[in-house]
Image (cartoon, rainbow, N blue to C red):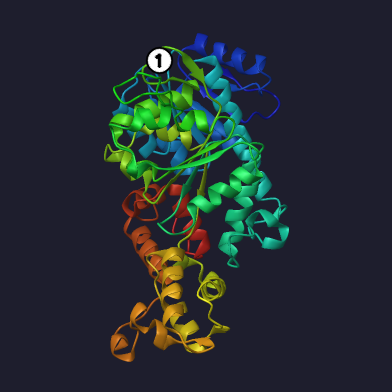
Amino acid sequence: MESIPEKNTPVLVVDDDEGLLLSIKATLVSSGLPEPALISDSRHVLDHVREHSFRLILLDLMMPHLNGLEVLKGIKANFPDIECVIVSASDEVATAVQAMTLGASDYLVKPLNSEKLIALVHRTLEKYSLQDELARFGKKKVFSELRHPQAFSDMVAEDESMALVFHQVEAVAGTDYSVVINGESGTGKEMLARVIHRLSNRSAAPFYAVNMASVSKTIFEDEFFGHAKGAYTDASSERRGFFEAAHGGTLFLDEITELDPSLQAKLLRVIEEREFYRLGSTEIRNVDVRIIAATNRDINEEIIKGNFRADLFYRINMYNIKIPPLRERRNDIIPLASHFLNVHAKANKKRIQGLSPELAERLLQAPFPGNVRELENMIAAAVLLEDDQTLNVSSARNLLPYTGPERRKNVELLTLDELEKRHIKRVLEVTGGNRPKAAKILGVNVTTVYRKIEKYNIADKN
């Protein structure tokens, strides 16, 4: 069976069960979504993908000739930007992890829930609309094109890479998407989450931030779901948990990958069902909360290691924002240092007017593994030692890594960008230009490899 609508459609459904194909078509069309293309023979999928501009493909896992994972490999190798969702009668974690490793963006279990199916298709197409919006002015993003620059007033940024981050925030803030913010410790993930909340339709409702690393097994349910009076010995009164407290607003789950795997299923259930029970109560409580999660780890790696549930990641990762580390946005170092100087000089009643040229140069050379937080701590400590009207290297000497001439003897000093470029180029040479294979070796997704090839203008060997 092959059914391709005359009008271009962004959705393709592949399944050897023709009855299920027609059922999915009816479900989507009746909900106002575009009529999907339908294919029952998996061998013909790639030919049609080459001919049409599909943005979402639903792939049955078990099919004759080519199974869903084999088709997924072919699609991602040639069209990495197409969203692919595996559909299976089996709810096996190992299969979900394998699908994610190959580039699947979600994993659905049969029998399909119509509401979840419609929601998935709707949010995927909406995600492409957001991407189109970001591309409206071309690839380069500038701060002057922000619609709500005042919302970012607490974040000091001048580097072009942060302009892109701010545009992504504006694009997703008005939706109800769950968002995952990736970034090293100290890059400002919570500050960005608060901006998303301020720009959202939920801005008048509460914003709660929870550090998941501090949540243990024993207190998880009490902290997140609350308890009824008498639920346990010390429960002398009822108590709201984080979900109830944040009702109508935003719940920020910082360092989400630190949550014990045994608790992730409980979190997933509330996110999916939007309901929960307080400890010691049989009363169902409905909740409307937007989830913004943050992590300094590679979630894909954590899933492969078995430390994080793939299905939870699928639910919270409706939109992803990556904050680059400070070493990759050098244009922000001096503005940030000057800002922190003003803040801490005022707090300590010191009349320090600016940075010395020598200190500014040393700051620009520093690697800042602790990112913005490390820079602030460095400036704050130097301010305490400075007696002059200019902040000098002498006040920060013990805080900065030494970069004297003896460290540079017989050593080729490269920027991080040049090191990354050379490494990616070498991996591509070893793999014969096979980008999915290179992505696996590099420990990133294939989309990142394509982006880096473009960024560094690496010659295409294909």
Q: Which residue is mark 1?
A: 281
Q: Position of residue 453 (x, y in %)?
A: 48, 59
- When asked about the image quadrant of residue 303, the answer is top left
Q: Position of residue 298 (x, y in %)?
A: 37, 48
Q: Position of residue 146 (x, y in %)?
A: 70, 56
Q: 134 left or right of 435?
A: right
The answer to whether one can see residue 69 in this image is no
Does 242 sit above or below residue 137? above
Total numbered circles: 1
Q: 180 left or right of 9?
A: left
Q: Which residue lies at the image location 53% right of the left edge and 33% below the top edge?
A: 246
The answer to whether one can see residue 211 in this image is yes
Work out which residue is located at the far top of the displayed protein and give it: 19
Q: Which residue lies at the image location 65% right of the left edge and 17% below the top edge?
A: 31
- When asked about the image quadrant of residue 33, the answer is top right
Element class at badge 1: loop
Q: Which residue lies at the image location 45% right of the left edge and 73% below the top edge?
A: 380
Q: 215 left or right of 57?
A: left
94 or 308: nearer the eye? 308
Q: Position of residue 451 (x, y in %)?
A: 50, 55
Q: Amino acid at mark 1?
A: Ser
User: Where does the C terminus fall, quadrant-wise?
Assistant: bottom left
Does 337 sit above or below residue 175? below
Q: How crowded is the residue under tag 1: few (<14 C-alpha within 10 Å), some, or many (20+)?
A: some
Does 360 sit above or below residue 454? below
Q: 121 left or right of 444?
A: right
17 or 378: nearer the eye? 378
